[in-house]
């Protein structure tokens, strides 16, 4: 009997592990920015039963006055703000704003050119993890539920045009902030991914990309998707093409969402193993692991679409 | 008819209240504001009419034996899981694994169904007004699945018994599934069932059954057979 109950619990854990959500306001250019942080917080809170280890989101399409937004996380008891600023300035970056909250650093800088040299310098700085570098987007992630993260990081004040989010029930790598989603595609600005599933060819593909010179900041399989897509986009593929190619190149079970500087998209594997439902109006498109999350942002009665296997779709502003 | 506002109750409280109302003689209940929550309406064994005004989440209307349930919305994964008898009418789309392991009764999906519709069915009927996804009827052991639209890849994969009827396109047949020609009597029977749900189109269905090549019911291991 005990074994039976254990099996049921394992099945429930497998069924519900991790939840993802995404939203885009299509007419921000005429209607102004939308409360993306607030909406994603509501969606992720309603998915809290799918994972409470950590919660994170990308808020994109921001009205940034500077060239880049940096989001860094630092180890405790190491004062790195000074060295970080020195290294950015040594590479030609001009710090415009800086804020530090506990172990989190947020910087906005003016800088022209390829961001890779600065990213590389920070990557090699002891005690520093880069959560995101973007022109119009930033990643906020922390341990706990959406409400916990909102309380610490004031997510409900963050505006943008689109974003993606994730609640995590860890299965593949350790429970800490760095291994939380979304994953930024080092060193490509504004590309990030949230993923529900497991990649079975992670080590092989990671090795392949490392040989090409790409860096990985974590041991989490989902980071591979971000790097994979960024590589494809940097080679000139459209977001739609990159997502379609991933259906063949990535092995395992996955439904993932991607956020770029001007769009969001999803890909669902050939096994249709991980859920995704979508609601869309002329103004807004929202997607999530479960309808309960969509109901938290749409008050009106809408048709719900459930993508089938081997499906991708994108929305661009 | 008694109305219950689900928004004011936890799922546990809601399911207990439904049972209390039925026990006290109320056989017609409307549930308002279900808000796509999971596990709404489970383990009801009485003949009664339940109307749910909105969408439900995972494993809703599951473990039923007798009730008639109408849902004016969508459903998440595994709607009607393990139903013994009764009827579920879903107005919109169903998530993956609708009618999983049902042993009897009837489930109608007005819209599309997700992957693995009718997985491991052991009896009963699953009728889908729209399309059905990947591996429809996977490991089906008995019963009927009727799909008025298209089905995805791997339909009828590893089915032992039972029948799948598809009016639209078939993505591909699953392992050990084969196509046979349905009789006129079967088609008339299906058309009559569909008419009960307001579908008057006389679809020409493709019939899918097990080819029987994966039958391995002998419980002896190879070395044991040599001894016997």
Image: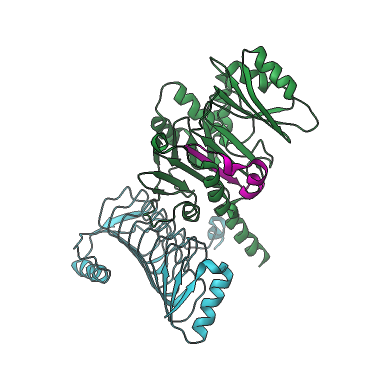
Q: Which chain can be seen in green?
A: A
Q: Check the picture and name the quadrant holding the N terminus of chain A.
A: bottom right
B20 within the magenta span: no
Give the magenta-colored segment's residue range. Answer: A144-170
Does B170 sit above or below residue A311? below
Give the quadrant of residue A65. Answer: top right
Q: Which chain can be seen in cyan?
A: B
Tell me where residue A31 appears, x and y as whole percent. Answer: 41, 39
Picture residue at 51% right of the left edge, 86% below the top: B24
- A140 or B139, nearer to the observer: A140
Residue A200 seen: no
Give the quadrant of residue B141. Answer: bottom left
Picture residue at 55% right of the left edge, 23% below the top: A66
Does A5 sit above or below residue A64? below
Determine the residue located farthest toward the right in the rendered image: A77
Picture residue at 63% right of the left edge, 45% below the top: A150
């Amino acid at each position: 009997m005990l074994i039976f109950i254990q099996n049921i619990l394992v099945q429930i854990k497998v069924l519900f592990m991790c939840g993802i959500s995404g939203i885009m306001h299509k007419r921000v250019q005429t209607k102004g920015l939308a409360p993306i942080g607030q909406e994603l917080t509501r969606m992720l809170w309603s998915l809290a039963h799918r994972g409470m280890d950590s919660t994170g989101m990308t808020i994109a399409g921001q009205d940034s006055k500077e060239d880049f937004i940096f989001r860094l996380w630092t180890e405790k008891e190491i004062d790195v703000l000074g060295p970080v600023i020195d290294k950015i300035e040594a590479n030609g970056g001009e710090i415009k704003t800086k804020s530090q909250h506990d172990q989190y650093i947020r910087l906005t800088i003016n800088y022209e050119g390829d961001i890779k040299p600065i990213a590389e310098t920070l990557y090699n700085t002891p005690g520093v993890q880069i959560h995101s570098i973007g022109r119009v987007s930033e990643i906020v992630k922390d341990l706990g539920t959406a409400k916990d993260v909102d309380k610490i990081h004031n997510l409900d004040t963050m505006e943008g045009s689109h974003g993606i989010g994730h609640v995590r029930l860890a299965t593949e790598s350790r429970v800490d902030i760095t291994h939380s989603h979304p994953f930024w595609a080092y060193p490509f600005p504004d590309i990030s991914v949230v993923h529900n599933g497991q990649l079975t060819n992670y080590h092989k593909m990671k090795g392949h990309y490392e040989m090409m010179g790409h860096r990985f900041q974590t041991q989490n399989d989902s980071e591979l998707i971000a790097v994979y897509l960024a590589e494809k986009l940097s080679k000139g593929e459209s977001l739609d093409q990159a997502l379609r190619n991933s259906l063949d190149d990535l092995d395992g079970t996955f439904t993932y969402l991607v956020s770029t500087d001007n769009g969001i998209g999803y890909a669902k594997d050939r096994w249709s193993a991980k859920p995704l439902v979508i609601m869309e109006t002329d103004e807004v498109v929202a997607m999530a692991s479960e309808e309960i999350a969509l109901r938290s942002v749409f008050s009106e009665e809408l048709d719900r679409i459930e993508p089938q296997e081997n499906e991708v779709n994108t929305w661009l502003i | 008819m008694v109305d219950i506002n689900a928004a004011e109750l936890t799922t546990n409280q809601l399911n207990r209240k439904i049972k209390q109302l039925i026990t006290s003689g109320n056989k017609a209940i409307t549930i308002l504001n279900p808000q796509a929550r999971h596990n709404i309406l489970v383990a009801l064994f009485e003949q009664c009419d339940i109307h749910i005004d909105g969408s439900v989440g995972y494993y809703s209307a599951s473990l039923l034996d007798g009730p008639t349930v109408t849902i004016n919305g969508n459903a998440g994964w595994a709607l009607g899981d393990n139903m013994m008898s009764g009827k579920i009418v879903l107005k919109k789309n169903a998530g993956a694994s609708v009618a999983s392991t049902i042993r009897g009764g009837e489930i109608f999906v007005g819209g599309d169904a997700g992957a693995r519709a009718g997985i491991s069915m052991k009896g009963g009927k699953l009728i889908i007004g729209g399309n059905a996804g990947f591996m429809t009827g996977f490991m089906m052991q008995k019963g009927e699945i009727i799909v008025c639209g298209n089905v995805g890849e791997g339909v009828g994969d590893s089915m032992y018994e039972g029948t799948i009827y598809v009016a639209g396109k078939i993505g591909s047949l699953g392992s050990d599934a084969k196509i046979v020609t349905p009789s006129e009597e079967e088609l008339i029977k299906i058309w009559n069932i569909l008419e009960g749900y307001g579908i008057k189109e006389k679809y020409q269905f493709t019939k899918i059954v097990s080819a029987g090549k994966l039958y391995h019911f002998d419980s002896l291991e190879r070395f044991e057979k040599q001894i016997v």
